[in-house]
Image (cartoon, coloured by chain):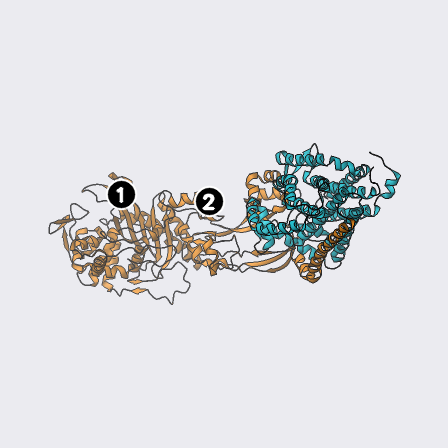
Chain colours: A orange, B cyan
Amino acid sequence: MTSQEEFDSRLRVISVIVGLAFLVLLARMWQLQIISGAQYKRQAFENRLRNEKITSPRGIIYDRNGKPLVKNAPYYYVAVQPEMVSLVDVRAVADFLVMDPVELSRMLAAAKNPIDPVKVKGGLTFDQVAFIESRISEYPYLMIDAEQTRYYPNGPVGAHLIGYLGKLNPQQVSRPEHHDVPSGAFVGQWGVEKLFDTQLRGTAGNRIIEVDALGRRLSVYREESPEKGEDIHLSIDLALQQTAEDAFANKVGALVAIRPSTGELLALVSKPSFDPNLFSRGIDYDEWVRLSTGENYPMLNRALQSQYPPGSTFKIATAMAALETKACTPSTTHFCGGALSKGRWRFRCWKRAGHGSVDMHDAIVQSCDVYFYQTGEDTGIDNIAKYARMMGLGAESGLRVVSEKSGLIPDTEWKKRTKGEPWYPGETFNAAIGQGFILTTPAQLAEMAATVANGGRRMHITLLRIDDESALEPEVDLALDPLTIKTLKDALRGVVAENKGTGGYARSKIVDIAGKTGTAQVITQREGDLQKDTPAHLRDHAWFVSFAPVDNPEIAVAVLVEHGGHGGESAAPIARRAIETYMTGLAERAGNAQN
Amino acid sequence: MLRIDRRLLTNLDWTLISLVLAVTLIGIMSIYSATRPLPGATQTTYHIKQAYWLCVGLVVMVGMLSINYKWLQQAAPWLYWGGVVLLIAVMVAGRKGMGAQRWLSIGPVSFQPSELFKLSFIIFLARQLSMESSEMSLGRVVKLFVMYAMLPMAVILKQPDLGTALVVFAMFGALVFTKGVGRRAVALALLIALVSVPFVGSVMWDELKPYQKKRITAFINPEADPEGISYHVQQSKVAVGSGGFIGKGYMKGTQGPFRFLPERHTDFVFSVFAEEWGFLGGLTLAALYILIILRGIDIARKSKDEFGRLTALGVVYMLTMYCFVNMGMTMGIVPVVGIPLPFMSYGGTALVANFMALGLLVNIRARRFELFY
């Protein structure tokens, strides 16, 4: 046993240590309460304040006549403060909200801090909201709130153009243009929604609210209002767009309509389409996979991203080049016996029996291949390419709604550069009738039609409504000879109006339509084969380019029907319906304006 | 053995008992304030339960007083091993709460064996040490550690309850040191400790559960804020600091009841108290604790036998450590470990165990004039 004194001294040491320990505690207390007291008092007050970003109402996208293409609809959701639920039965809450309790627990466990409410269930109907609100006193830590969500009342109509929303992905969050976007907010990720997102988004507001411990709002401490997003007025005509989409029915293809005098885009259709509402609250991964890899690829914008051989529609370019370079005249005739022999090759005309002796007008009306083989040879591929390009072929349209294909207009230089070979004469024959290397998108052919309609002045294509037309200048003025224009327009009118014309299905009782059919080969047809005997997926693609009315055209339309067979049969009627709807609408509005 | 003597009554340390009761009542008041409901919600009953446990504690204390603590010395091994068995029972059949398996349920009652164990550990260790020589070698210390401290520490750690395990370890060290260790042994021990800290540290680090790692990380670097651990501490500091000099007034604290302060009636009850009573209140409470502890030291000094001395000191160490760690934790100078504030924090088992400890102290003091009973 130690001696008493030794023990006492040890006890003294222990007392001192205990005293020191408490001294440390008191010193810390002093530091927190006296030295930093004011700062902590402020923080205690601030704990009762919560910062919220207020999303600004997103701008509305209108068509050219002021009809809304999108809506901001209220989206009701219920949120829970995670900390609260530890006091109660998660199962009970899950039952009340009709949710899977495991899912609810997971959501609460994933919360970043115990205080901020976690959205647990959204998309509530009015009935559900009423039900929850009526019993909210039993579950005081639940709160119902609403936010704006994007709603597309027309569903898939115009989806490829309008686009859809989505949350910011990690790469986008750090970009400077997204700095003011509240976390979890939806921004435009595709189409017009994306192209004009900065304007549509507006500026988020800020609200500082005082809350009680349950996170319920007591009062608003300070608020900065959000700035509403700008509205966008597209040049699209909704009625035309809807009719055009209907006219396609189950067919796959595209339609582009342009206003020739201004270059305004009147319609852009790509079928199959998709429902952009699927994206408004964040699309399911499986749903996304279905859409992007589904049958016929609904997410593909065929108007701008698919390129096909233009077929006989390209004869417009060939004819124009021929006339302008004086390689021939409107009255130049050639004999078509069903084929043209060059050396040891035979180049067939689609009509086995041949067209007989035809001039340019007839050749266009009846779409004689032989005539154009000859004309093409006389004009030369480089000239043809030149005029084709001036009309907008071979380059992106510039709409920037999606990444576009630029098509292909070959010439000798191109051949040399890409294939290291000279251009062979036979290739001119193919090119002259729009086959071979030539590739075009529906948008480009619409531009071509619009240029012809506008007398050889190609306007810059735009999807925004133009309010002041006086200052418009053409993008390219082909400076065509008026005779060329007249010849082309007369012939194209004949395609539809004359009995021998290939575009008879586009004949309309209410408006004078001019156009050109085309058929893009998918596989080489055996002689005499009929389209209807060929399996559908091997049938040729059908084209129809058109404008109306022939004098003072208001609209130019290009239609492509995949595997549609002959252009005259499947594509032309779609164009006619579209044009008729548009012209009727114009007349109505003009009539209303007069009253 | 169970004789309630008039002599006993006059020898009771009423001062100490009053001090403890004062702290306990302050505790109940703080619990009431901390758990007061918001308008519309119903009042919880924690403060009532704590009062109920206080009564149980008083009964147990009286029981503790009635026996001769010498009897405890003889019963010590049973208490110790019984405690270990209960700890193992928790590991095997315990009830989980707050992510830790610390409770045992017997019928309608659940209790925390680890809280009771700390007392039986003190008693047992005091007994063993009182049979040792006064200058123990390092080897002897290690042997004692392995025999008596390692197993319970491991079992407690498994719960997981890092705080209590560390307290057991610290109490072992303190009591051993008090008993008397040769200077050479001390120097050697310190050297070994310093050298082995990195190694032991890294081994221990891997053994820690993720939330324990996060607590330590949060302590070292609050800015990193792993999963809101520092959120708790930050809120606690705000509560304490915003109390200022005289506090916000009873029932007027906003941090606690407005739920910004989690665990406000258990581990963080001091924050509630400090917010409402300010520095003056904290000073008063600290004074009460200091007086209790100094009283305990005095009891140790006046005790007639070594067992009594060591037991009393063990209780003193335990109370000091708990106070320091808990209050330090709420003020952000100690990492967050789940240690309650003695007599203040809500918790039935802890309160009863602490009243047993109080009873033990009073017992030792009351019989200081008796050599053999």
How far apart in space, not on screen, are marks 1 and 2 (Cα)?
A: 35 Å
User: Where B155 sits versus A7, above or below?
Assistant: above
Percent x, y of residue A542: 28, 47
Percent position (x, y) of residue B7?
A: 88, 40
> Which chain contains the residue that carries disc 2?
A
- Say if mark 1 contacts mark 2, CB within 8 Å: no
State the residue position of label 1. Answer: A539
Kindly identify which numbered label has been placed on residue A284: 2
Q: Which amino acid does label 2 sit on?
A: Asp
Residue A461 lies, in percent from the top left, at 35, 60
Q: Residue A60's spot in the image, x, y percent?
A: 48, 56
**Numbered disc 1: what chain?**
A
Would residue A330 appear left or right of B190 to someone viewing this image? left
Which mark lies nearer to you, 1 or 2? 2
> Label 1 is placed on what type of residue?
Arg
Q: Indicate the quadrant where residue A222 lies.
A: bottom right
Q: Is residue B36 visible?
A: no
Q: Can residue A416 be seen here?
A: yes
Q: Residue furthest bottom?
A: A471
Which residue extends farthest top? Answer: B107
